Image: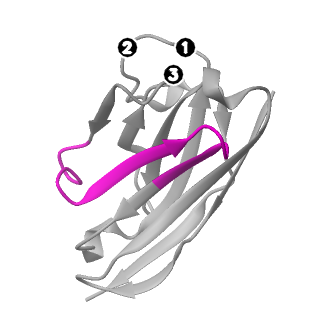
Amino acid sequence: QVQLVESGGGLVQAGESLRLSCSASGRTFTNYAAGWFRQAPGKEREFAAFISWNGRRIDYADSVKGRFTISRDNAKNTIDLQMNSLKPEDTAVYYCAADSRRWGTMTRPEQYDYWGQGTQVTVSS
């Protein structure tokens, strides 16, 4: 079992930056791939970023590519999402997710077994 807790959300203006952090506890987190998803009101949960268990595979949704950076520190059991040049359309609840699969790139919510409770990001225009 893995427990995930997100932090770092908040209210910012368009063009500003935020850094989200996901802290993991439980089983050895180094064995888990991780992703960030987001869900805006009235919309489905959508993929934002993925990082493999060893950090060698990274993928981003087209909507965030070039602005968001995912990283992990396995010594600290954390997954971070650096978000730059934020836009109002980035407003959503952001969720951290993890799964023990060690192959492929996982971009769908159903591919993940563990989820955090989410953190709100609001970008004003």
The range drawn in magenta is 61-80
Please say if the residues under marks 1 and 2 sit with CB atoms less than 8 Å apart: yes
Q: Identify the mark nearer the N-term, 3 or 2.
A: 2
Residue 43, image x, y percentages = 40, 54
Amino acid at the residue labelled 3: Gln
Query: In screen coordinates, is 115 left or right of 20?
Result: right
Q: Identify the mark nearer the N-term, 3 or 1.
A: 1
Label 2 crowding class (10 Å Cα cut-off): few <14, some 14-19, many 20+?
few
Amino acid at the residue labelled 2: Gly
Choose mark 3 or mark 1, whichever is in front.
1
Circle 3 sits on which residue? 111
Residue 43's tag is none
Please say if the residues under marks 3 and 1 sit with CB atoms less than 8 Å apart: yes
Residue 52, image x, y percentages = 44, 26
Residue 104's tag is 2
Q: Is residue 88 above or below residue 34?
A: below
Residue 101's tag is 1
Amino acid at the residue labelled 1: Arg
